[in-house]
Image (cartoon, rainbow, N blue to C red):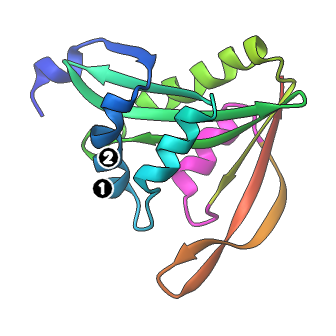
Amino acid sequence: MSALLRSQTLSYRPMTEADLAAVLAIEQQAYPFPWTLGNFRDCLSSGYRCEVAEQGGELVGYSVLASGAGEGHILNCCVAPTHQGRGIGRQLMQRLIASAKDYGIGTLFLEVRPSNRRAIDLYEHLGFESVGLRRGYYPAVRGREDALVMRRAL
């Protein structure tokens, strides 16, 4: 990665159908059990808040937020592995938190693998707290992995 690309400003915009190939490519690089193209299409067609982050004309991350009844559920927030560790995930999360009020959201929820300590540390730093455990929530190499449920009141 060149110093020029690292120094370029991030820009954000709503995700479109035209972004889905790049979003899916990042999803497949980042996760051993990625979402499908259908998952992303369903989020777009359902009117969820879907956003992409671009840097230097390259799509480098995305987020998906569902809302209803005063609650928000962060369904996905991902940064391309080659761009991780640069604060992009933090910025995507901060944008989700800031936009929640526009959707009438008073509380945000998310799930995270207990093995994903880096993400848990970020979420805690952003004011999320652990409130529960969903047993066998995620597919894993050896069966299923639990999900830590985290919440942030706004």
Q: Residue at x 68, y 23 (%)?
A: 97
Q: Residues within 10 Å of mark 2 (few under 14, many from 20)?
A: many
Magenta range is: 113-128
Q: Secondary structure at mark 1?
A: helix
Percent from the top left, x then y, of residue 122? 59, 40
Left or right of 107, for residue 54: left
Q: Residue at x 60, y 22 (%)?
A: 94
Give the spatial CA distance, label 1 vs label 2. Answer: 5 Å
Under mark 1, the amino acid is Gln
Left or right of 28, for residue 74: right
Where is mark 2, residue-wise?
26
Q: Residue at x 63, y 35 (%)?
A: 46
Where is mark 1, residue-wise?
29
Under mark 2, the amino acid is Ile
User: Viewer-proximal residue, 91 or 56?
Assistant: 56
**Residue 120 falls inside the magenta stretch:** yes
- Say above or below: 105 vs 72: above
Q: Residue at x 20, y 19 (%)?
A: 57
Percent from the top left, x then y, of residue 143? 57, 86
**Residue 52 falls inside the magenta stretch:** no
Percent from the top left, x then y, of residue 15? 43, 26
The image's mark for residue 86 is none
Q: Residue furthest front?
A: 45
Q: Secondary structure at mark 2?
A: helix
Looking at the image, do the residues carrying marks 1 and 2 touch, with CB atoms under 8 Å apart?
A: yes
Quadrant that contains the C terminus: top right
Quadrant that contains the N terminus: top left
Left or right of 30, for residue 97: right
Percent from the top left, x then y, of residue 9? 29, 11
Choose top left, top right, bottom left or bottom right for residue 83: top left
